[in-house]
C-alpha cells in the first residue's frame, strides 16, 4: 500500500466522520455525536498506526510526503476553516441583532467543521501530489 492510497482511505474515513457529525448536528443528539466522533477518531488512530507498521519506516510522513504539498494543503484547510468560522460568527451576530432572543451554536458544529477540514486537507494534498507528479504515485 502506498502512502497516497492511505491518505485517500483516511480522507474517506474523515468524510464519513464529517457526515456523521453533520447528521447528528441536524438531529441535535449530542451523546450519540460524541460516541460517533470517538469511533471515527479510533478508526483514524488505527489507520495512523497501521500505516506506520505497513510502510515500516521510522517516520513515514517525512519519508513519503512532499513537505511543501503537505504544508500547502494544511494551510489551505486552515484558511478555509477560519473563513467558515468567521462567516458563522458573522451570521450569528447579525441574527442576534435582527432577531431578539437566544441564538447559540450547537456543540456538534465544531467537530463537524474539524472533520471536514481534515478531509479537505487530505483532498488538497492528493490534488497537489497529482498535479506535481502528473498521476504518478509517490512510490512508483
Image: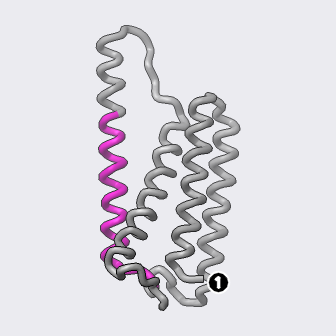
Residue 54 percent coordinates (x, y):
64, 84
User: Is 75 contained in the magenta span?
Assistant: yes
Task: Point out the residue furthest to the front here.
Answer: 135
Displayed quadrant of residue 42: bottom right
Identify whether 111 is placed above or below 42: above
Displayed quadrant of residue 20: top right
Q: Which residue sits at x=38%, y=75%?
A: 129
Q: Which residue sits at x=61%, y=63%?
A: 44
**Residue topped by disc 1:** 53
Q: Which residue sits at x=63%, y=48%?
A: 37
Q: State the predominant SS element of the stretch in magenta.
A: helix
Q: Is residue 94 left or right of residue 49?
A: left
Question: Tag 1, which secondary structure?
Answer: helix
Q: Is residue 132 left or right of residue 16?
A: left
Residue 24 percent coordinates (x, y):
62, 36
What are the residue bounds of the magenta stretch?
Answer: 64-87
In this figure, which colouring scheme has been used for the structure?
one colour
Identify whether 119 is placed above or below 28: below
Q: Nearer the viewer, residue 114 or 12?
A: 12
How many numbered callouts? 1
Quadrant containing the N terminus in the rendered view: bottom right
Residue 79 percent coordinates (x, y):
30, 52
Amino acid at each position: 500500500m502506498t502512502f497516497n492510497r492511505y491518505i485517500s482511505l483516511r480522507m474517506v474515513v474523515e468524510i464519513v466522520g464529517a457526515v456523521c457529525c453533520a447528521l447528528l448536528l441536524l438531529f441535535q443528539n449530542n451523546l450519540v455525536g460524541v460516541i460517533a466522533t470517538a469511533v471515527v477518531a479510533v478508526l483514524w488512530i488505527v489507520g495512523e498506526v497501521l500505516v506506520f507498521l505497513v510502510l515500516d519506516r521510522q517516520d513515514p510522513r517525512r519519508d513519503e510526503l512532499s513537505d511543501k504539498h503537505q504544508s500547502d494543503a494544511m494551510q489551505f484547510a486552515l484558511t478555509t476553516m477560519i473563513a467558515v468560522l468567521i462567516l458563522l460568527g458573522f451570521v450569528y451576530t447579525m441574527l442576534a441583532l435582527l432577531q431578539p432572543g437566544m441564538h447559540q451554536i450547537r456543540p456538534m458544529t465544531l467537530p463537524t467543521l474539524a472533520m471536514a477540514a481534515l478531509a479537505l486537507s487530505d483532498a488538497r494534498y492528493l490534488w497537489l501530489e497529482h498535479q506535481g507528479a502528473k498521476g504518478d504515485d509517490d512510490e512508483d
